[in-house]
Image (tube, rainbow, N blue to C red):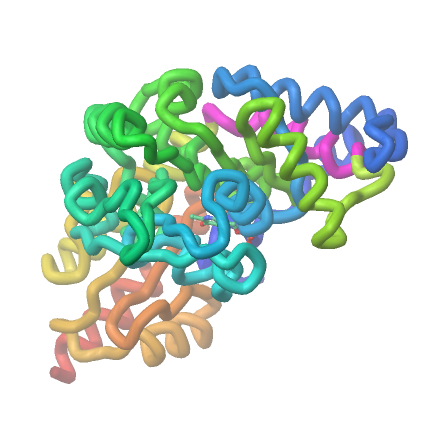
Amino acid sequence: MAIDLRSDTVTKPSLAMRESMASAEVGDDVYGDDPTVNALEERVAAMFGQEAGLFSPTGSLANQLAIRTLVKPGEELLVETRSHIVRAELGAAATFSGITTRTWPSVDGLLKAEDPLAIAHENAGPYLVSTKAIAVENTHNFGGGTVQPIEEIAKLSTAARARGIAMHLDGARIWNAHVASGVSFAEYGKHFDTISVCLSKGLGAPIGSVMLSTKERVGEARIWRKRYGAGMRQVGIIAAAAHYALDNNIARLAEDHARAKKIAVALAAVDASLVDPAKVMTNIVGLDLSKVGITAADLTARCKEAGLWISALGPHYARLVTHLDFDDAQCSQAIEILEKILKSALMAK
Ligand SMILES: *Cc1c(COP(=O)(O)O)cnc(C)c1O
């Protein structure tokens, strides 16, 4: 069977997770009657010190519901250049909410509070677009699983809020950030007005995200979720998988991080330009192929022939993501496959 490192979304629900789904108590969630969903929303909100939560089928929708409660049509959201909100949500902020975005660049997605603060224009008057919110992605996906320093988050949040600018956390992989940094969910949570978290990435649930905020904003988001057609019925069957994931799959993310580090160390030994293992903080390994004589598309194709699936995310950038369904034996095999292909590319150069 192929080893699949394209993303941490490829995991399949375990038997125990499926059993928890099969026995879940359910009700009609559009009527607010699903006890498993209600408990999940309350549980995740409490973890992050937020008032309320809203279950959502995807992280993209949770992000979009959150930011539309912070930013009105014709107003502005600031985001990092390679963030999921601007790169991978198909223009949803503009399409659905009339929100304009402006971006700041960074190295490896790493947050420096001064970068967004330098381009923010709160109350910009009648001629310029007013900045209403800033989004932070933690961990940063296309930055290579980068963990955002809590000091920079705190500095940004304090300065932004003092200027009347709200803070959104795209926490699709906040679980990985927590395990890598030891910073509590509540500590992360207090710096943000809205938060989205994914249960379907490293935590291994098949579907599901939660949007968090005040009762008022979550109430508003609940209306928009229904308006977008994502009001779900006996969805406790899925929320049960999320509960199972929260009960069992957070601490074990450290194993995914260790395997990602192991891959990075092995490949850096093949050629130091490929990856800096010190920058591999979580479960994502980004490979810079610009100096090794193989394109990302070629590497991906040759890996696939050898039984290893990875992603080509740019002409010279490939990504590997470790996860729940990837063990030590597969890790050794993946390293062997990558070493062989990369060494032969270097020899042919
Ligand atoms: C995966 C991801 C999301 C949400 O993705 P969906 O596929 O819509 O669930 C949001 N933000 C980041 C950073 C992600 O990696």
Determine whether, in the image, residue 207 is placed left or right of residue 90: right
Pick whichever, 194 or 301, lies toward us.
194
What x and y, as percent, mark residue 290? Answer: 16, 72
- Residue at figure coordinates x 75%, y 46% from the top left: 226
Q: Which residues are magenta?
A: 236-251
Quarter of the image holding residue 288? bottom left
Up/down of 330 relative to 161, above or below: below
Residue at the limit of the structure toward the front, as seen here: 126
Residue at the limit of the structure toward the right, as seen here: 27
- Residue 184: say if magenta: no
- Residue 242: say if magenta: yes
Pick whichever, 119 or 151, lies toward us.
119
What x and y, as percent, mark residue 230? Answer: 74, 49
Q: Is residue 259 visible?
A: no
What x and y, as percent, mark residue 69? Answer: 53, 40
Determine whether, in the image, residue 319 is placed left or right of residue 244: left
- Residue at figure coordinates x 20%, y 70% from the top left: 289
Determine whether, in the image, residue 151 is placed left or right of residue 183: left
